[in-house]
Amino acid sequence: MPAMVEFIPETTRSWTTNLDGVPALTLRTSPTPDPHSLPVDHVLVKILSVSLNYKDAEIINGLFKHHKSSVAPPNLIPCADSVGVVVAVGPTSTPTTQASSTSSPPKPKWSINDRVISVSYPLYLTGPAAPALLAAGVGSATNGVLTTYRVFPSHGLVACPPSLTTQPHLACCLPIAGTTAWMGLHWWRPISSSPELFVAGDRSSESLLLQGTGGVSMFGLLFAFAANFAHVILTSGSDEKLARAEELVATAFPKSATKLSTINYRSTPQWHKRVLELTDNEGVDIIFENGGGGSPSTNSTLRSFQCVKFGGIINSIGYVGGKTDILSPSSDSDTAKGAIDGGNDEIAQAMSTNINVHALARNFTLKGLLNGPRDRMEEMLRFVEYHKIKPVVDKVFSFDDARDALQYLWDGKHFGKVVIEVSPDA
Ligand SMILES: NC(=O)c1ccc[n+]([C@@H]2O[C@H](COP(=O)([O-])OP(=O)(O)OC[C@H]3O[C@@H](n4cnc5c(N)ncnc54)[C@H](OP(=O)(O)O)[C@@H]3O)[C@@H](O)[C@H]2O)c1
């Protein structure tokens, strides 16, 4: 007889997609998985809150095509990041909480009422990512978490940090955005079991460029301030969002020595030049490259190539500005109008320079990030707990308003994270 809470409804409500757009999301009802016949080392979780990622909207809109091994099933339940409460526990194969090796998933032992966070790539345990791990992606290649009840393998969950257990709408933001930001700051450093490593101020000479005020950037901002970075430069298309970011760090880190500079990439399209001005012409140590491609007027990656410090790191994270480099002048509205300025001209030239030459010129490392492994996620959660970091949530939508929530995210209206409350926290 499995351990379970007394009342579990007979039906589960799930949003589903055939990758045909947010408006076509369909709410379906199905029998709740039988708590009495859970597979070995699986648990049934009542989902409390789900946070949205750019990728979720991209998948639903049929645009997530750059990872060939990530193929969605029909009527996919979307979304990857959630917090829930364990309501039934299946038989366990072993009482141990330790993985037998680094290549086999751990078998954590969950109990009824445990607060748990879902892991976006449950088979990605340590080290570099691999295509086979993508094939187990939650809310991409396998059904996701935009549902009221879901069965998880025990290794597909981690414990919610104690300081956030009563705030599932905050904790659910951690898996993808938190882990990716953490990786962007630490992937080349040895993993640490102690959060002290990042408290001692060993990052106090480093500078960081964050692009946009979405989920990944806001975690980057919080983590960099908590780790005593010297200087964070944040870009946004909105002065209002930049002011919010200044207010956020002033409130969350009132005694911090970290300097925050802001740049509006719309009113300062040659923002890389401003980054150089702000760093005594040296450039920044670390860049979160969220912008990606575009025309000479907007291309973000090419600008990052010009303002990374000699020997610095560019984390290739996203492409909110576009997935292609638009070289043709006729495709570029400014150029077509004959309005190309000196800065854009330089970027247009940089576009025809081989990437190898760019990397050599400033001796930078361009690293493709794919979220992060479980051990790094757990390292990030220790840091979050140590510093009592509160994720930045812009807006919480109801489960029935999931379409509005996803459209709000896709329209880029948010600051930090967008969350859906699936079930009220009892
Ligand atoms: N590689 C990975 O493992 C990984 C993990 C998570 C996310 N990502 C990717 O990283 C990117 C950001 O993800 P997210 O979850 O933080 O997204 P998000 O929360 O949706 O935020 C996106 C933000 O980007 C900003 N933006 C829009 N156009 C921009 C441009 N041309 N240049 C710079 N910023 C721009 C906007 O902020 P403002 O309004 O402030 O300008 C927008 O709110 C996405 O492309 C996502 O797919 C990758």
Image (cartoon, helix red, strand yellow):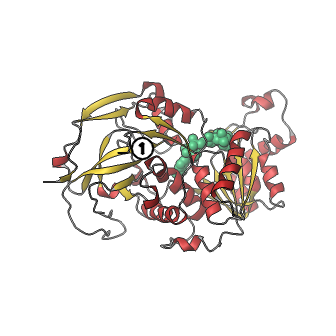
Residue nearest the viewer, comparing 344 with 410: 410
Query: Is 392 situated left or right of 34 in this image?
Result: right
Residue nearest the viewer, comparing 413 with 139: 413
Q: Position of residue 146 (x, y in %)?
A: 39, 39
Q: Which residue in the rendered view is the most extreme toward the right?
A: 342
At horizontal 33% and vertical 58% (from top left) the residue drawn is: 155
Specify whether residue 66 is in view.
yes
Residue 218, compared with residue 203, is above or below; it is above
**Quadrant of the rendering where the C terminus is positioned:** top left
Q: Position of residue 182 (x, y in %)?
A: 55, 59
At horizontal 75% and vertical 38% (from top left) the residue drawn is: 266
Q: Position of residue 51 (x, y in %)?
A: 47, 44
Residue tagged 1: 49
**Label 1 residue SS:** strand
Residue 128, compared with residue 423, is above or below; it is below
Q: Which residue in the rendered view is the most extreme toward the top?
A: 23
Which quadrant of the picture is home to ligand 1? top right
Residue nearest the viewer, comparing 74 with 264: 264
Query: Is 217 situated left or right of 168 in this image?
Result: right
What is the three-letter code of the residue carrying label 1? Ser
Q: Quadrant of residue 183?
A: bottom right
At horizontal 37% and vertical 33% (from top left) the residue drawn is: 15
**Quadrant of the rendering where the N terminus is positioned:** bottom left
Q: Which residue in the rendered view is the most extreme toward the left?
A: 1
Q: Position of residue 106 (x, y in %)?
A: 32, 64
Mark 1 Cα shell of 10 Å, populated few (<14), some (14-19), many (≥20): many
Specify whether residue 369 is in view.
no
Q: Quadrant of residue 208?
A: bottom right
